[in-house]
Image (spheres, rainbow, N blue to C red):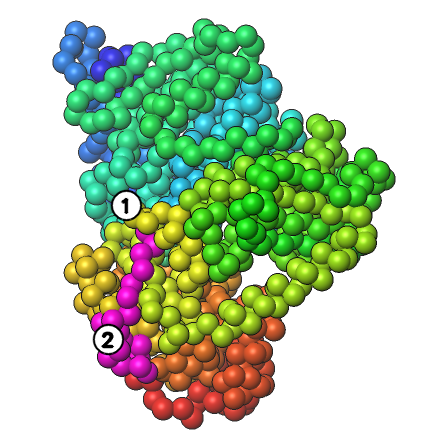
Amino acid sequence: MSRYIATSALRGARNVTREAEAWLQKALQEKGKDAKVAFPNTAYYLPTILGLTGQKVETVGDLIPVMDQIRCYLHPVPAESRWTPYLGETLDAGIATLLAMETVQALRYLFGDQPEKFPGFRLAQKSESGDGGGYLNGPIDDIQLRSWGIQLVDGRMPGFAAIVGCAKSNQVAVKIIRELQRRNILTFLAGNVNGRSIIHQLHEEGVEMGYDTYIVPFGTDTLSAIYAIGFATRSALTFGGMKGGQAREILLYNRQRVFAFVLALGEVDDLKYAAAAGAISYGFPAIADTVIPEIHPTGVTQYEHVISMPFNEIPGKDDLERAEKLVQRCIEVRGVKIKMTEVPIPVPYGSAFEGEVVRKADLRFESGGKRSRAFEYLYMAPMDKVEDGKVELKGPDLDSVPEGGAMDMGIVVEVAGRKMQEDFEPVLERQIHHFINGASGVQHVGQRDITWIRISKAAYDKGFRLEHLGKILHARFHADFGAIVDKVQVTIYTDPASVNSMLQVAREAYNKRNTRLATMVDEDVEEFYSCTLCQSFAPNHVCVVSPERVGLCGAYSWLDCKASYQINPTGPNQPIPKGQLLDPVKGYWSGPIEFVQQASHQQVQTVSMYSIMENPMTACGCFECIVMVIPEANGVMVLSREDPSMSPAGMTFSTLAGTAGGGLQTPGIMGVGKYYLTSKKFLSADGGFKRVVWMSSILKQTMAEELKKAAEYAGEPDLLDKIADETICTDVNDLVKFLEEKGHPALTMDPLM
Ligand code: SF4
Ligand code: ZN
């Protein structure tokens, strides 16, 4: 342990504590001790303070005991003559720093000083309410945290990087970001060096920042870096089922499961040292691109690391190569697991580009949408009929389409493999969306014959042509589905006659698949499938996935699980033989019960497939919707993850999710995938779809057709008009009044409880 670091960190901790005290004094004087203090859209109060101290801060006054605790963590700056290690003191100073930083940021919110104003800035995120221009991101909301959760558990997103400071040049800044994006590492940005931040650099270079590009600009000061720690703390609370105040568990959880590191660009000042000391307690090492003293593993813990990698001394032919090596080193230090597929195309590739939008002004070419038609179709062919790696374009290429123009197109993928089954065709076909979207400058929307592909001018200028769509698919199907797919051949049709004839073939296949899916019922199969992917976050959670009940994240259907079991026989999706049927109405089988007992480590004794009232399935945290009983209405409400408004249960999605998650069984509350709402087995033991009395309007809009069918099946074709939503009421009394006016069937059904 270096005395230099210890001294700087202790000094930094003292300064930021004084700053927090000053803000608190100001808040007490100007706003009073009852003034509300909160970060937006989180159920976790001030998350770092909640996690590390157990205090649920809601008002300015609640911060007074927090300040006392911060002071307890502060030790004197080491004297010149002292030679003993200062590790304990330094780590304590780090914790004090994090608590003080969060205190300051929360009070800045109170004074309208956060999120930071940044003229001309616009966040890249679809869910943005209002125009969102002119401000940086601020803390990440709970909804986004959960939606990244599933990517973190299934390995699509290996971890996060917190970058603090300013890179040597704009080009280096962009290169560092691109290297991280290429590996799907989530990147948080904060801090500055002499007033200039990497956020300025990226903004000047036109790099899109926001949730959709995995680059989240917190603020241009070091204080806003606390939002990264808040995110890490909430991961442990949300997915690890930890409670506020379990500081040790939360820190260990992060050390073991959250692959994160701090990259300090440019000069490291006292506050940065102090914050880095805090990050080390979370197991996050700090790497600096300047000369600083290093901390090596002491044996006490694995990751007590401060690494110095002076930028100009990194071997490499130019700054861009040095930037690449810097990122590589960060990943090695923290041991981030990276799964990367080389895709031979002329533009950058990675899931970080999946959310990218190709705007009208940047459009070179599109197929699908209003002006043309695109479709995609994947089918299984005999081994000897498929030539692996062959990509053929039948018809004209992009060069013959004027700028901004459109053309019909069909993408047909033939796959062969000894373990391939016809049932896997739709599972693989659906991947085309992710695979193609990974190319920078290419946007993919929809599937089947409502596919819509847009290609940007920038991608075209770099040499992207239609054959590259095929190259992407070939590389990714091999990389991700190599266990069931041995050969992949792609044909891209743009010549109008063959587009039309292939489209007919594809449509016949879509229809056949629809019929097969619609007739596939729980009764007809021998086995259900488990999904325990989320156990890395919620250690006792198990999804039991059946043909009529999709996993609660919405990402795993029965067929998906079946395919995944073929790909990885020892993986998270295992067949569960149904065993003996114990209760056909509530959905009890001996097989799932035994499986859940064992896989939940005896935390869950029994599980019903079709009831919310009796032994419902557990929830991990990544559910698309929450279904919850509203006793006054004798029915249930369905609250979508995308709905930020208040619900008749008196809580928002974020707050409710805190009660429903963590792998617990909660009668009356269930996390579900949204397509389960349309299943004939939805709450079938409790009265089915007719029980729904309130539903987020976004579900009504986006699933109108499917829900209408469910209503018809329930024998209430007008049911949707009788179901309230947040535009009608968010209060239970108003809800009951509305239901009475409309004559909702739930009011006269058997009592739920
Ligand atoms: Fe997690 Fe269940 Fe989805 Fe599997 S199906 S990823 S366990 S939510
Ligand atoms: Zn989950």
In reply to whether residue 584 is colored magenta, the answer given is: yes
Write the start and end of the magenta stretch as one range. Answer: 572-590
Between 689 and 155, which is closer to the camera in this rendering? 155
Q: Is residue 666 left or right of residue 739?
A: left
Between 382 and 589, which is closer to the camera in this rendering? 382
Residue 504 visible: yes
| Front position among marks 2 and 1 | 2
Q: Is residue 255 left or right of residue 362?
A: left
In reply to whether residue 315 is colored magenta, the answer given is: no
Q: Position of residue 79 (x, y in %)?
A: 19, 12
- Above or below 402: residue 324: above
Looking at the rendered structure, the number of numbered marks drawn on it comes to: 2
User: Amino acid under label 1?
Assistant: Gly
Q: Check disc 1 and report the residue beneath it.
A: 51
The residue that appears at 23% across and 38% down in the rendered structure is 252
Q: Based on the displayed image, in which of its 4 quarters is residue 76 positioned?
A: top left
Q: Check disc 2 and report the residue beneath it.
A: 580
